[in-house]
Image (tube, rainbow, N blue to C red):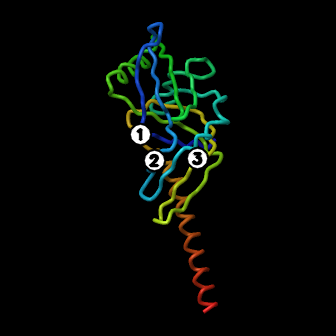
């Protein structure tokens, strides 16, 4: 599996207690309709239908994408994920017997940790070559495997490198198309 990680800086992420007084962490791991800068001249957004074919997966909630720090899991019912008009909303039931989970809960409650992210593979996306020379991808369909509470939500190097390679290919194709257009123009002149 070629795992890529997309990180979203905007979130409504909080620690609170449920109706029974149990600690929970909840918030939006992805927000629809917002452009997220990957690198200069490169951005992407998440389409509202991107999660339609993936929420039945066995998805984990992690800390900083660390697979040794599991906070919850959809299979066990300790992680709930839902899509609404705003984005992908998640609710993690915190294990009070897990000191790592409780430490994170307290950090979120204090506001020290408030970033969200998610890990996925792209199944389908649309590419837009904008007039200003920038490239924008709209993620249409993903294979979601994890959501994370993050100290520093930032794009993973592998994700940036993948997008950089894609952009280089698009720029090469754009230059070739311009050359062909100029040749045709000269030929017709």
Side of 111 where 39 appears, left or right: right
Residue under circle 1? 9
Q: Residues within 10 Å of mark 2 (few under 14, many from 20)?
A: some
Quadrant of residue 101 in the image? Answer: top left
- Residue that appears at 62% across and 46% down: 140
Percent coordinates x, y for residue 59 in the rendering: 60, 28
- Residue that appears at 41% across and 17% down: 16
Kind of element beneath mark 3: strand
- Work out whether mark 2 precedes mark 3 in sequence or the reverse, and give the earlier one: 2
Kind of element beneath mark 2: strand
- Work out whether mark 3 precedes mark 1 in sequence or the reverse, and give the earlier one: 1
* Nearest to the observer: residue 111 or residue 148: 111
Question: What distance separates the C-alpha of mark 1 from that of mark 2?
Answer: 8 Å
Kind of element beneath mark 1: loop
* Nearest to the observer: residue 180 or residue 164: 180
Please, is residue 164 above or below residue 11 in the view?
A: below
Please, is residue 158 above or below residue 176 in the view?
A: above
Question: What distance separates the C-alpha of mark 2 from that of mark 3?
Answer: 11 Å
Percent coordinates x, y for residue 52 in the rendering: 65, 36
Percent coordinates x, y for residue 151 in the rendering: 38, 33
Residue under circle 3? 139
- Work out whether mark 1 precedes mark 2 in sequence or the reverse, and give the earlier one: 1
Quadrant of residue 143 in the image? Answer: top right
Percent coordinates x, y for residue 78 in the rendering: 56, 18
- CB contact under 8 Å: marks 1 and 2: yes
- Residue that appears at 38% across and 37% down: 152
Say which quadrant the N terminus sits in: top right
Residue under circle 2? 36
């Amino acid at each position: 599996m070629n795992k890529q990680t997309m990180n979203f800086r905007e979130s409504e992420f909080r620690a609170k207690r449920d109706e029974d007084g149990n600690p929970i962490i909840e918030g939006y791991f992805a927000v629809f309709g917002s452009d997220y800068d990957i690198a200069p001249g490169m951005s992407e957004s998440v389409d509202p239908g991107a999660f339609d074919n993936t929420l039945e997966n066995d998805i984990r909630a992690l800390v900083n994408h660390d697979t040794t720090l599991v906070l919850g899991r959809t299979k066990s019912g300790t992680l709930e994920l839902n899509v609404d008009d705003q984005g992908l909303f998640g609710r993690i039931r915190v294990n009070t017997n897990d000191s790592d989970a409780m430490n994170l809960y307290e950090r979120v409650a204090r506001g020290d940790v408030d970033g969200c992210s998610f890990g996925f593979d792209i199944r389908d996306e649309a590419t837009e070559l904008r007039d200003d020379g920038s490239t924008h991808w709209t993620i249409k369909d993903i294979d979601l495997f994890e959501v994370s509470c993050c100290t520093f939500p930032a794009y993973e190097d592998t994700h940036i490198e993948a997008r950089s390679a894609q952009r280089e290919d698009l720029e090469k194709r754009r230059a070739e198309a311009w050359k062909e257009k100029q040749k045709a123009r000269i030929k017709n002149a």
